[in-house]
Amino acid sequence: MLSALTATAPWAYGPGVGFFPFFFLIPLFWILLFVVLFLVVGRRRRRWMAAGGGWGGWHQGRSAEATLAERFANGDIDEVEYRARLEVLRANREPMR
């Protein structure tokens, strides 16, 4: 039985005949597929995180200034406190990278 398997194996016909050229293409195909998937998923994830998605929920994308403005609009804080807190937020803002 071993001789029958060896006789029908693609490499039994000689170099360059049968399955031999595809031996190198199959791993290359899978590597290329994983690289493309990684790039596509990574790009979409970065866009989603930048749009305020993230693991923390909807509030993670909101800025502190938007939250402060909402509290002022609801009447939770007065104008003096709003302006003071807004000034502190803008003074401590991280520089853009």
Image: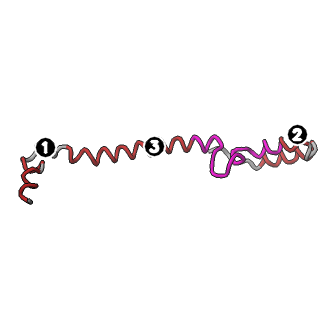
Q: Quadrant of the C terminus?
A: top right
Q: Amino acid at mark 2?
A: Ala
Q: Quadrant of the N terminus?
A: bottom left
In percent of width and height, residue 69 lies at 83, 41
Q: Is residue 52 visible to us here?
A: yes
Q: How many marks?
A: 3
Q: Secondary structure at mark 1?
A: loop
Q: Amino acid at mark 1?
A: Gly
Query: On the image, numbered disc 3 is attached to which residue?
Result: 39
Q: Is residue 90 visible to us here?
A: no
Q: For the point 43% across and 43% down, which residue is it?
A: 37
Q: Describe the colour scheme in one phrase.
A: secondary structure
In percent of width and height, residue 61 lies at 69, 44
Dot 2 and dot 3 residues touching (CB under 8 Å): no
Give the magenta-colored segment's residue range: 47-68
Residue 60 included in the magenta stretch of the image: yes
Separation of disc 2 and disc 1 at Cα?
A: 75 Å
Specify which label sits upstream in the sequence, 2 or 3. 3
In this rendering, position of residue 20 left or right of residue 25 = left
Query: On the image, numbered disc 1 is attached to which residue?
Result: 18
